Each structure stands twice: as C-alpha cells, then as structure tokens.
Image (cartoon, rainbow, N blue to C red):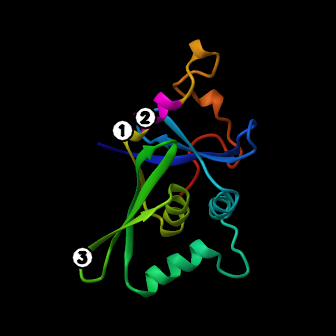
C-alpha cells in the first residue's frame, strides 16, 4: 500500500548538520524523516519558496527536458529502505500513453515532484521499516513514532508546506 505525503518541513539535523526532509501522511500525523544532501535540500528549498534562480538548476533542467519531450510526471514514490538508504522511482507517462518508471534518489524525486506539481507517495513498508531503524526510548534514544513537536517547521508556516 502506498501513502500520499506532503513535505512538512525542511530542517537541519542538530546532531549531524545534515538536511532532513520531513514527509507527512496527508491523512494522519505519521511523519517520515529522510536525510538528504545539501544540494538537493537547496533545490527543494528554492522550489518551496518559489525562488527562481537566474539560470536553470539541474532539477529545473530535468523538468524542462521532460516538458519538451511531451512527457508528464505523474507521481514519485519512495519505494524502499535498505541498509539505511531510501530508494524512489519517478513515474511518468509519455505522449503515446506508455508509462516510464525511472530509479531515483528520493531527494531528487521530491525536488522534481515540486517542480512538476505531482503527488509524492511512500510505500507503507518504508514507514514501518523507518520506525524500526530509529532508536527506541528504552535504548536511551528518541521515541520511534514521530510527533509534530519533534519536527518543528524551518520553512513555511504551520501546516503542510505548499506543493
């Protein structure tokens, strides 16, 4: 089963200094943190804030190429979590109606989804696996279920960020 999500926050991990995208289930308070690279976080932040760089960035170039080829990005899906690495696909429909699915890093897929104005989904097993990889309270770490208070907004107002 796949769960539709929105970007809830883009923030820095206080322990590692690595950017984190927080995805939130549109129908519940379930959240999924995905650690991303600095360049991808910047690409996501620029699109969330609707800041147009003077020249196309890589994700803008990809969107422009897709449009020129007559292809539509239908959705992106975070498909799995293996060895603490998230995997995703970009699902597209070509002008002749055929479908194309491309392997992607979730951060790149999310950056493209924002530019293509398409939905983002996460496989339910990914959320379950992510909870199992977080330290539990008994181990002296944080709780395994994420609450809204644990993930403050860094970009945007309270509530889901615009897509």
First in sequence, mark 2 or 3: give its number: 3
Q: Residue at x 74, y 36 (%)?
A: 15
* C-alpha gap between disc 1 and disc 3: 28 Å
Camera-near label (2 vs 3) is: 2
Q: Secondary structure under badge 1? A: helix
147 falls in the magenta region = no
Which stretch is magenta? 127-133
Hey, which quadrant is residue 13 in on the image? top right
Position of 125 relative to 162 (above/below): above
Q: Residue at x 31, y 79 (%)?
A: 94
Few, some or many C-alpha atoms within 10 Å of disc 1 (few <14, some 14-19, many ≥20)?
some
* C-alpha gap between disc 1 and disc 2: 6 Å
- Is the Cβ of the residue at disc 2 closer than 8 Å to that at disc 3? no
Say whether residue 70 is left or right of residue 15. left
Q: Residue at x 50, y 55 (%)?
A: 106
**Residue 90, x across and y down, in percent:** 40, 64
Q: Secondary structure under badge 3? A: loop
First in sequence, mark 1 or 3: give its number: 3
* Label of residue 145 in the image: none
Q: Secondary structure under badge 2? A: helix
Residue 29 is at least partly visible in this image: no
Q: Residue furthest front?
A: 83
Few, some or many C-alpha atoms within 10 Å of disc 2 (few <14, some 14-19, many ≥20)?
some
**Residue 96, x across and y down, in percent:** 24, 83
The residue wearing badge 3 is 98
The residue wearing badge 1 is 125
* Label of residue 129 in the image: 2
Residue 132 is at least partly visible in this image: yes
**Residue 47, x across and y down, in percent:** 63, 64
């Amino acid at each position: 089963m796949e769960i539709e999500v929105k970007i809830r926050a883009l923030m820095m991990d206080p322990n590692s200094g690595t950017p984190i995208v927080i995805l939130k289930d549109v129908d519940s308070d379930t959240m999924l943190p995905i650690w991303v690279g600095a360049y991808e976080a910047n690409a996501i932040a620029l699109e969330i804030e609707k800041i147009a760089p003077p020249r196309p960035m890589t994700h803008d170039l990809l969107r422009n190429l897709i449009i020129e080829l007559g292809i539509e990005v239908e959705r992106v899906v975070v498909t799995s979590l293996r060895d603490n690495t998230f995997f995703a696909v970009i699902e597209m429909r070509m002008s002749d109606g055929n479908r194309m699915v491309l392997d992607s890093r979730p951060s790149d897929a999310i950056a493209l989804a924002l530019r293509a104005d398409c939905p983002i989904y996460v496989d339910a097993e990914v959320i379950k696996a992510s909870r199992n990889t977080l330290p539990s309270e008994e181990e002296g770490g944080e709780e395994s279920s994420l609450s809204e208070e644990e993930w403050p907004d860094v970009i945007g107002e309270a509530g889901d960020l615009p897509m």
